[in-house]
Image (cartoon, rainbow, N blue to C red):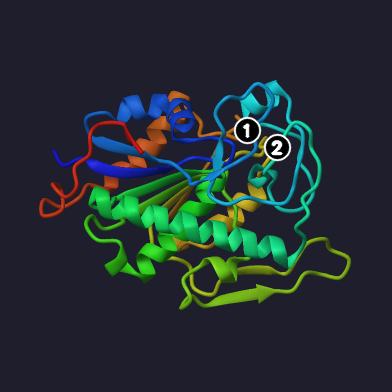
Amino acid sequence: MPQLKILCLHGSRQDNVVFSQRIKVLTKKAAGSMQMHFAQAPHELPLLEDQEVAMRAWWRHPKTMEITDAAEEDGQAERLPGPPVEEASSSRSGGSSQLQGSDWEAQIVADWEGSLRALEGVWRDSGGFDAILGFSNGAAATFLLAAHVLARPADFPGRRLRCAIMAGGYVPQPLDRLLPHSTEITRTLRRAGEDGADSLQLAQPLCLPSLHIFSPQDGLVSAEQSKQLAAQFDASRSQKMEHELGHCVPQKANHVNIILDFLSWFEPPPDEATLGQLPEDSMD
């Protein structure tokens, strides 16, 4: 039976090894029918206290915050106003960045461009993927990568992308500078007195089947933010899974089964099934 090839994108303050351990129940149950490839983001974050290996992000973000050991382990932290704090490049000592406003936008854009180049290389070297699975910062990157794959198929040869799964995801900003240049977006002006910037979203949702996983108990990325991300995909081909476990890819049996059932619809055709076969549980 042909195996699905799934590109897995970790969250901020994780790396490919950490993420593979966080979803090991899913990986174990998928063995034999799916190949999970855990990519590594190119951007290192400052070391936290007692860390020996720097964690990574697909792009860095200006907010800084302190996180206790327990909060870091659980993936939870007190929510701060503004963009998701999961993106924050943070250290125990806190402190604020010297970059402000448009300078940070430029940094985020530059970081994403570097991540996109890295992911293009992974895609070509691996012969393409049937699905992308991303968590938090990796879920936002999944959205952006899917948009680029659909807009520039010649740059992503091999297996054809068939679906995407995003857990604890959100719409990244500045969206108009992160998507392919040909993408049409709409701008919703913020209401008087509201914090934050104007809201940007796709004028036409991505025509790609998607599964969106979110939790009302998520202390880092709100369920509403994840629903805004879901709205960027064709609603007729989109599914949602709500859970009570907070900021994570839930690994209880019922949740894992929903993910696997969704993926089971996207078995590659025979002419693509042998493209770029990977060793099981491969990582960069």
Report x, y in % for residue 120: 36, 57
Whether pointer 2 and pointer 1 mark residues with C-beta atoms closer than 8 Å, the reply is yes
What residue is shown at x 44% (from left), y 58% (from top)? 116
Residue 219 visible? The answer is yes
Label 2 crowding class (10 Å Cα cut-off): few <14, some 14-19, many 20+?
some
Report x, y in % for residue 13: 59, 36
Report x, y in % for residue 183: 48, 75
What residue is shown at x 73% (from left), y 69% (from top)? 198
Q: Earlier in the sequence, mark 2 or mark 1?
A: 2
Q: Distance between the residues labelled 2 and 1?
A: 7 Å
SS class of the residue under badge 1? loop
Mark 2: which amino acid? Gly
Mark 1: which amino acid? Gly
Residue 48 sits above or below residue 225 on the image: above
> Which quadrant of the rendered structure holds the N terminus?
top left
Residue under numbered circle 2: 219
**Tally of numbered tags:** 2
What residue is shown at x 48% (from left), y 27% (from top)? 22
Question: In front: 264, or 169?
Answer: 169
Badge number at residue 246 = 1
